[in-house]
Amino acid sequence: MMTEKQLTDALRRRDEAAFRELILRFQPITARVIFKITGDKEETPDLVQEVFVSIWEQVKNFREEASLSTWIYQLSTNKARNHLKWKKLRTGFRLSWQSEQAQPPAGMNHSLNMALEMFERKDDENAITMALQQLPHNQRTAFVLSKSEGLSNPEIAAIMKLSVSSVESLNFRARQNLVKILLPYYNNKKS
Amino acid sequence: MKPPQSCPQTGELINKLLAATDNEAISMQNDPHLTGCPHCRFVIDQLTADLEKWQQQGPGTIAIDPTARIKSASANSGKLQPILVKVAAIAAASVLTGLIVSHKLIPASGPTYRDIAADYTLELSTDDSFPIDYFNEE
């Protein structure tokens, strides 16, 4: 098995065997992250494929300031964000708050109602998946990388190109918003 | 006895579980409040199950073949290159022809800016057309 450095060098030489190894090694991570951020099972394979094509095309410009896995996480989270932006534009449906400065109380009530309606319609869906779709993209990404991928705050900061304190703040706000969504859901479920 | 429908500590416990590492989540099960509060116990058990399910959740086995796409992209870029070279050569030839033709057709000894400016300079002492006597009339 090649090291990340060997793999990167081989990709720069346009070694297709190395590219296949890269896919085998990183496809599960890429698919998991994209799926958990977008919540879109149908589009995930196409998005994963596009990430790997981007790696092949951009590996010459990869400056190795970060590790290969950090770079792949960056490409995956960016791909997921761009997909959501495009989807939002296409459908005109408000999936997330436009910015961190949005009014949480009004947005939260709207999101909360929407989430509860969705839970009622799709009882088999996971509550966490549905609640995450109500969070702003940055909060969702930080939460997925932390809770699903088990990455540390400095690692997430490198992927999201933020300071460690910003990542801590994003995770804190993500949890607060999730509590606001999940608490009425579980209370209703019990009754 | 029917368990209570809500508890003021549930939100705080949800937050704690969401922030917890795997080991912390396990030790949270022995939280003294949970042993005495059936509502919080229910919510935390549900959330723990949902979190575990979510962590294991993925898009399933996905069949992708980006190698085919990069090969076709390389093949297309190979086909595109001669076309781009031809287009660039035609554009350069057109610009060159235009420059040559314009150089040949436009006479070099046309009126200059200075000539035109001189034409319109008002020389009061020599300009006959200016009715200077008008001002001298009483």
Image: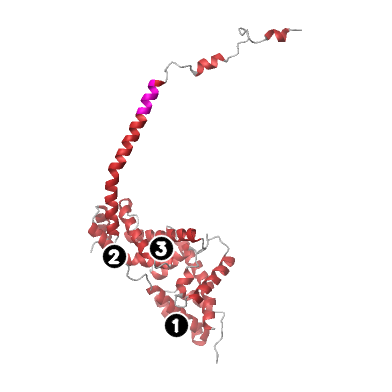
Q: Is residue A179 visible?
A: no
Q: Name which residue lies at 42% across and 70% down.
A: A147
| Residue A35, horizontal then vertical, whole percent | 40, 67
Front in this rendered view, residue A149 or A129: A129
- Mark on residue A156? 3
Residue A106 vs residue A22: left or right? right
Q: What's the residue type where badge 2 is placed? A: Arg
- Say above or below: A161 vs A112: above
Do marks 3 and 2 share a chain?
Answer: yes
Is-magenta flag for residue B127? no
Closer mark to the observer between disc 3 and disc 2:
2
Badge 3 or badge 2: first in the primary sequence: 2
Instruction: Please give the residue where the numbered disc 2 appears in the rendered image.
Output: A25
- Taking the image as shown, residue A154 lies to the left or right of residue B66, namely right
Q: What is the chain identity of the residue bearing mark 3?
A: A
Q: Which residues are magenta?
A: B97-104
Q: Are marks 3 and 1 on the same chain?
A: no
Mark 3 surroundings: few (<14), some (14-19) or many (≥20) residues within 10 A = many
- Is there a contact, CB below 8 Å, between mark 3 and mark 2? no
Residue that label 1 marks? B29
Query: In front: B68, or A162?
Result: B68
Looking at the rendered image, the quarter that the C terminus of chain A falls into is: bottom right
Residue at 52% over, 77% down? A185
Q: CA distance from mark 3 to mark 2?
A: 20 Å
- Residue count near mark 2 (Cα–Cα under 10 Å), binned few <14, some 14–19, many ≥20: few
Q: Are marks 3 and 1 in contact (CB under 8 Å)?
A: no
Q: Is A84 placed above or below A187 here?
A: above
